[in-house]
Image (spheres, helix red, strand yellow):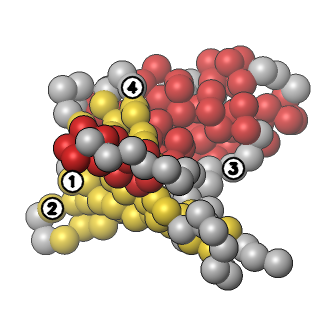
Amino acid sequence: MANYFVHGSFTFPINAKQMTWLRKLIRQLDALPDYIAEAEVTPEQACYQLKVPKEALRLAMYIGAESTAVHNEYIFVKDGRKHYCHVLGDEQFDVEEAAHFCSAFLAKFKPKGAIIFTWAETCSQTRPNSFSGGTAMATADRWVAAGADAQLAYLHEKSVGLEVIND
């Protein structure tokens, strides 16, 4: 039996104030699934009661709807005078969670900014179509993602005029 994995890791620069806001947000998000279950409230009610910032509502609703804890790991690094947020997931990186997280940050601090990241899909055994990955871009109000196969197929059709015959 083969095991399938999704790996992701990226960083973006932050300052001390942004790091404090993100740490508080992660604590709120970690508490969300248990709060929903214990208080027997909807994700919307939990967000209001836990005072989740409005910039993070899509992220909180995603986590609340999934009824699971935060999947990815968020590490804050200080390198000299610079601070970074390192988002990572080994084996089960959650692309959607990472994109919503980035959108929340951008909505609060960089409304005209964007964060781009990639992920890899692997398998413990060689299987057809089991190795791939993709790219995502988050902005303050939305995110988009495409798998590597879709990106390559688009480039081939546009630049070379070839028809890709396998999925």
Disc nearest the viewer among 4 and 2: 4
Residue 71 at x, y percent in the picture: 62, 55
Out of 87 and 36, give the one closest to the viewer: 87
Q: Identify residue for label 2.
A: 82
Which one is in front in this view, the residue at disc 4 or the one at disc 3? 4
Task: Report how far apart the C-alphas of labels 4 and 2 lie in the structure.
Answer: 27 Å
Element type at mark 1 = strand
Mark positioned earlier in the residue sequence (3 or 2): 3
Q: Is residue 40 left or right of residue 3?
A: right
The dot on residue 40 is none
User: What is the crowding at mark 1: few (fewer than 14 residues within 10 Å), some, or many (at least 20)?
Assistant: some
What type is the residue that disc 4 sits on?
Arg
Is the C-beta separation of discs 1 and 4 under 8 Å? no
| Mark nearer the N terminus (1 vs 3) | 1
Query: In the image, 102: left or right of 127?
Result: left
Residue identified by numbered label 4: 142
